[in-house]
Image (cartoon, rainbow, N blue to C red):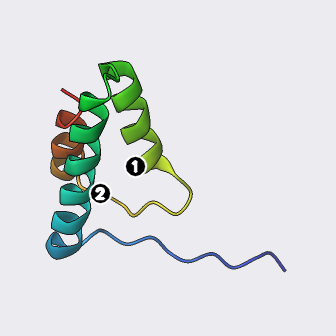
Amino acid sequence: MGVMKEIPVLMTDKDFDLEYNTLKIKMEDEKQKGHDWGMRISYLIGWTTGETAPIHTPEQLGKIFALAD
C-alpha cells in the first residue's frame, strides 16, 4: 500500500491575506537589497509551487506574482 498524502485545499481569504502580507514584506526587502525581477519572481514561483504549498486561486496567484514588479 502506498503512502497516504494530505489532500490540498484552497486557501481561505484570511490565510491568503496573512500569506500575502508576508510576501509583500519579503519582496520589499528583496527590492531594497537590489535583487532584480528575475530573482524575485523565482522566489515567488518556489513559494507557490513547493510540495507543501497550499492551492491558490488564479486571482490569488495574480496578486502574488504582481509583487515581483
Q: Position of residue 27 (x, y in %)?
A: 26, 40
* Neighbours of disc 2 within 10 Å: few (<14), some (14-19), many (20+): some
Q: Position of residue 23 (x, y in %)?
A: 27, 51
Element assignment for label 2? loop
1 vs 47: above or below: below
Q: Nearer the viewer, mark 1 or mark 2?
A: 1
Question: Image point 45% across, 70% down: which residue?
Answer: 8
Question: Image point 52% across, 63% down: which residue?
Answer: 52
Q: Quadrant of residue 31?
A: top left
68 vs 10: above or below: above
Farthest residue in the front direction? 33
Mark 1 = which residue? 48
Are dots 1 and 2 in contact, CB under 8 Å?
Answer: yes
Q: Position of residue 16 (x, y in %)?
A: 21, 65
In the rendered view of the protein, which quadrant contains the C terminus?
top left
Q: Which mark is residue 56?
A: 2
Element assignment for label 1? helix
Which amino acid, mark 2?
Answer: His
Q: Position of residue 39 (x, y in %)?
A: 40, 25
* Neighbours of disc 1 within 10 Å: few (<14), some (14-19), many (20+): some
Viewer-proximal residue among 36 and 46? 36
21 vs 66: above or below: below
Give the mark nearer the N terminus: 1 vs 2.
Answer: 1
Left or right of residue 8, residue 14 in this image: left
Left or right of residue 39, residue 68 in this image: left
Viewer-proximal residue among 67 and 53? 67
In the rendered view of the protein, which quadrant contains the N terminus?
bottom right
Question: Image point 35% across, 30% down: which residue?
Answer: 41
Q: CA distance from mark 1 to mark 2?
A: 8 Å
Q: Quadrant of residue 43?
A: top left
Which amino acid, mark 1?
Answer: Thr
